[in-house]
């Protein structure tokens, strides 16, 4: 497993994101045969090179979306009412979703990069970066966004680009 260095990750993003997003746009317009399989292989390769406990960049720089069920479960775990939990930690964004007020997330232990409420964390956190949620071209808009925040997504896209450069697409 390769250690995640967030400083060099940010530098790589600044250098390469434009090129990567142009590649993704071209891929969306001309989806190769076997795209789903390619994404699955690229995903596997990405996780072989990424350890979330070295990173936690999603918890540091993004907010999960909390469902009503997430709020109910987490507030019960913390012996709070859902209303008190919302009042203390969340706000409603323009689209009506409940999001964290604070960044990094209030539940992130910054010394260990572990989540203090791991067992009851929001469903959005449990699934992030959602590589397997919906493999296929319809999901590429998420890659456009998350290459900037998530080293695993960045590496997934990098793996697909390497395959394309080798003539494998
Ligand atoms: S709830 Fe846990 S997993 Fe989710 S953003 Fe906060 S620290 Fe990260
Ligand atoms: S999901 Fe991505 S951003 Fe979050 S900790 Fe893992 S590699 Fe880092």
Image: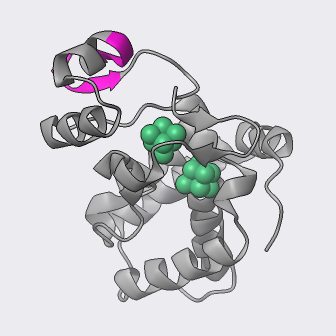
Please name the residue shown 33% across and 45% down the image: 122
- Whether residue 50 is visible to the viewer of this picture, yes or no, is yes
Q: Position of residue 159 (x, y in %)?
A: 64, 73
**Which quadrant of the view contains residue 45?**
bottom right
Q: In this orientation, does residue 18 appear?
A: no
Viewer-nearest residue: 108 or 166: 108
Q: Tell me which corner region of the image, top left, top right, bottom left or bottom right, holds residue 73.
A: top left
Q: How many marks?
A: 0
Q: Is residue 37 left or right of residue 159?
A: left
The stretch in magenta equals 88-99
Residue 133 located left or right of residue 155: left
- Of 52 and 164, nearer the camera is 52
Q: Is residue 9 above or below residue 39?
A: above
Q: Residue at x 62, y 73 (%)?
A: 47
Q: Position of residue 25 (x, y in %)?
A: 43, 53
Looking at this rendering, what residue extends furthest in the top direction? 87
């Amino acid at each position: 497993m390769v250690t995640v260095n967030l400083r060099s990750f940010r530098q790589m993003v600044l250098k390469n994101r434009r090129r990567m997003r142009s590649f993704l746009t071209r891929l969306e317009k001309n989806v190769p045969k076997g795209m789903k399989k390619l994404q699955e292989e690229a995903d596997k390769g990405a996780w072989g090179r990424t350890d979330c406990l070295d990173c936690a960049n999603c918890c540091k720089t993004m907010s999960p979306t909390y469902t009503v069920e997430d709020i109910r479960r987490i507030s019960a775990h913390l012996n709070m009412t859902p209303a008190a939990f919302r009042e203390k930690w969340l706000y409603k964004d323009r689209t009506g979703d409940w999001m964290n007020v604070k960044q990094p997330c209030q539940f992130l232990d910054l010394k260990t990069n572990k989540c203090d409420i791991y067992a009851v964390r929001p469903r959005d956190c449990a699934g992030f970066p959602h590589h397997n949620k919906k493999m296929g071209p319809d999901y590429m808009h998420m890659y456009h966004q998350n290459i900037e925040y998530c080293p695993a997504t960045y590496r997934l896209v990098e793996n697909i680009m390497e395959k394309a450069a080798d003539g494998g697409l």
